[in-house]
Image (cartoon, rainbow, N blue to C red):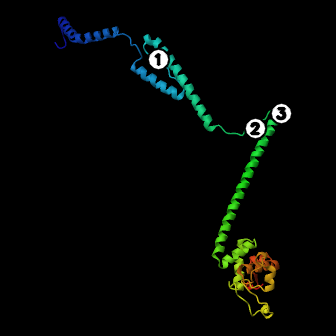
């Protein structure tokens, strides 16, 4: 009959199953036996060591500490002692790290201020203010000296430029030398040249034999076409011994006469002009 077994058959089947499972159970009992007699670990496990190392790094970086609690109650005392030692070490390192950061910040970002001592009596404060005033005065004096030196360099450069023009000679050289002798600015050179070109065409020996002065026997001569009496009166004293046709001497006489008679503005304008803007003699 299907599914029906006799009591004897059931006992036989049960006994066969027990024999089959015997090696497995024996191995389990042996493993439990070895585990029960295994000595406790003398130190923290690999997992505990890794976790403690990670906590140490985090504590140094952030200033905090994460406690490591061992799972084995038999190692509780040794773990607590190790934890206290690690906590103390991390705390010391954290304090040291913070001190270094603070010192670095102070060194790089502390403002620099001018300190003026001021005691209760006020004498030191006045002395401090006097020191500041003296310092500012020295700065102002230094700026003045620097400006003076710069002006002297500019003047020296201008003298060198005029020396070069004078050394080349010709009309520009004569004008430059005459203005320097008269102590007039070289910026007047273009205006003086315009007058000279209108009067004599730049010829230092030009003589006018056809105007009213010529008819009176006192013809106009030289670059600026001055008559002898005008030349004698207005030539620069340092050049009084030169003839009327001397280029530099003639320019000094003509320029001085024009300024005295018509003013500096006429000289700057390049001579007199009529209503149509055409040059007319002086």
Which of the pair 44/125 is nearer the observer? 125
Query: Do callouts 3 and 2 mark residues in contact (Cβ within 8 Å)?
Result: no
First-in-chain label (3 vs 2): 2
Which of the pair 48/94 is nearer the observer? 94
Q: Nearer the viewer, mark 3 or mark 1?
A: 3
Give the Cα distance between marks 3 and 2.
Answer: 14 Å
First-in-chain label (3 vs 1): 1
Secondary element at image label 1: loop
In the image, taking residue 74 as reference, residue 168 lies left or right, namely: right
Give the Cα distance between marks 2 and 1.
Answer: 59 Å
Q: Residues within 10 Å of mark 3 (few under 14, many from 20)?
A: few
**In the image, residue 186 above or below residue 143:** below
To which residue does mark 3 refer? 121
Which label belongs to residue 116? 2
Q: Nearer the viewer, mark 2 or mark 1?
A: 2
The picture places residue 236, in percent across and down from the top left corner, at 78, 76
Query: Do callouts 3 and 1 mark residues in contact (Cβ within 8 Å)?
Result: no
Image-quadrant location for residue 133: top right
**What residue is drawn where x is 69% and y is 79%?**
193
The picture places residue 38, in percent across and down from the top left corner, at 34, 10
**In the image, residue 279 above or below residue 134:** below
To which residue does mark 1 refer? 69
Q: Quadrant of the C terminus?
A: bottom right
Which of the pair 117/1 is nearer the observer? 117
Give the Cα distance between marks 3 and 1.
Answer: 66 Å
Q: Is residue 270 visible?
A: no
**What residue is drawn where x is 70% and y is 58%?**
149
**In the image, residue 126 above or below residue 212:** above
């Amino acid at each position: 009959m299907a599914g029906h077994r006799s009591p004897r058959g059931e006992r036989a089947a049960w006994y066969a199953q027990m024999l089959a499972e015997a090696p497995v159970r024996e191995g389990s009992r042996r493993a439990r036996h070895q585990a029960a007699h295994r000595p406790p670990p003398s130190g923290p496990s690999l997992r505990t060591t890794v976790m403690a190392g990670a906590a140490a790094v985090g504590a140094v970086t952030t200033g905090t500490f994460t406690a490591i609690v061992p799972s084995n109650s038999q190692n509780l005392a040794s773990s607590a002692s190790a934890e206290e030692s690690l906590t103390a070490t991390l705390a010391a390192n954290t304090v040291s790290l913070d001190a270094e950061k603070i010192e670095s910040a102070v060194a790089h970002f502390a403002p620099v201020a001018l300190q003026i001592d001021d005691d209760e009596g006020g004498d030191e404060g006045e002395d401090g203010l006097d020191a500041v005033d003296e310092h500012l005065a020295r700065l102002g004096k230094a700026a003045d000296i620097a400006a003076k030196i710069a002006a002297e360099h500019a003047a020296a450069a201008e003298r060198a430029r005029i020396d070069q023009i004078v050394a080349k000679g010709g009309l520009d050289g004569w004008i430059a030398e005459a203005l320097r002798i008269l102590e007039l600015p070289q910026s007047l050179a273009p205006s003086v040249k315009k007058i000279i070109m209108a009067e004599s065409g730049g010829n230092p020996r030009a003589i006018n034999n056809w105007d009213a002065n010529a008819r009176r026997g006192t013809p106009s001569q030289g670059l600026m076409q001055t008559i002898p009496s005008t030349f004698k009166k207005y030539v620069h004293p340092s050049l009084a011994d030169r003839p009327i046709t001397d280029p530099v001497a003639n320019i000094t006489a003509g320029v001085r006469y024009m300024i005295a008679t018509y003013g500096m503005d006429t000289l700057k304008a390049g001579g007199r002009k009529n209503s149509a803007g055409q040059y007319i003699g002086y």
